[in-house]
Image (spheres, rainbow, N blue to C red):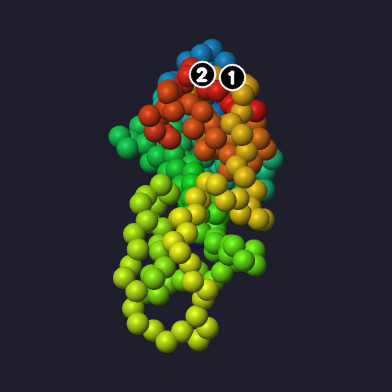
Amino acid sequence: MRRRLSSVFLVTVLAVLPWFHLGCGPAVNMPFTAEVDDPDYRRGKELLRMGREQEALALFLKVIDQRGGAAAESHLEAGILYQKHIKDPIAAIYHYRRYRELRPSSEQARLVLQSIEACIREFARTLPAQPLDNQVERTDLIDALDQMRRENLELKEQLAEARAAVIRTTRPAAPATADFGMAAPALEPSQGGFALEEPGAPVEYAAPVAVTPVAPPAPVATPPPAPSVQARPVVGVTPPAAAPTSFRRHVVNKGDTLMSISLRYYGNRTRWREIYAANRDVLPSESALKIGMELKIPQ
């Protein structure tokens, strides 16, 4: 009987002892309570409404620490405070990322990602070299350089065609004979012919070399004069257009180039040389455009 009473007393003491421990020890938050119902979290939200951001941030960080980091709403509030009030983008990025890890499918996850990108840009602006801005400028310069290369290739092709046309127009024509009115074959300098060096230059005759002609030409008293390049029109070649007599006026704005002005007034970039030639009095070079300069645009 006495042993039975002792056993009952021991069981009673063991059952009541935890209650004495909880009643005498400090109060703690239960880990299974909702975060939004946590007293520290609710107090932090109240301090935010009062404009006491530093105190509110301390309470949100306390909630995060008490819950072992598993406090998504407190991470979100801390990230906003670090970004907008403390101006610490690195700390804000950490709390934003913790929120996305805990709430990846929430409605605010996409907005939080935009906030992370904004913090990254804000932090990049504090660096001496400003890498993000320089990268954008470098991309724009590369695009402009590629465009200039393409335009340069087009100009080279047009220049080659113009040179070929000049060679065709300056090629001497064979002189006509008095007897038949037909063009006699041109003689080489070694056969007693002549060569044109430049328009208007004196004609130099080479000494004839003894050759065995197949069909000797008719005797000519005097050698014919050198044909004038300017006096002999070449069939099939369109003469150059007359110089324009009227002009339009254009005031140079920021970003204007001769090619962009040509595209605006003529519909293509290839006529920039006409604009340059008409404004040689104010343009010492093709790249000497200045904002506010007034240019003449040939019509």
Q: Percent from the top left, x then y, of residue 4?
A: 54, 59
Q: Position of residue 293 (x, y in %)?
A: 47, 19
Between 292 and 32, the one lying in front of the other is 292
Residue closest to the eye, 254 or 161: 161
**Which residue is found at the position 60% from the left and 50% from the top?**
233
- Please name whichever residue, 173 or 184, is drawn nearer the observer in this view of the structure: 184
| Quarter containing the N terminus | bottom right
In terms of secondary structure, where does tag 2 sit?
strand
Q: Who is closer to the viewer here, 249 or 60?
A: 249
Q: Is residue 115 visible in this depiction of the protein?
A: no
Q: Does 98 sit left or right of 205 as displayed?
A: right
Residue 30 screen position, x and y as percent? 55, 40
The residue wearing badge 1 is 249
First in sequence: mark 1 vs mark 2: 1
Residue depicted at x 35% and y 32%: 126
Cβ–Cβ under 8 Å for marks 1 and 2: yes
The residue under label 2 is 294
Q: Is residue 281 visible?
A: yes
Q: Looking at this view, name the residue that lies furthest to the top.
A: 50
- The amino acid marked with disc number 1 is Arg
Q: Check disc 2 and give the amino acid type.
A: Glu
Q: Is residue 60 above or below residue 164?
A: above
Which residue: 39% across, 52% down? 198
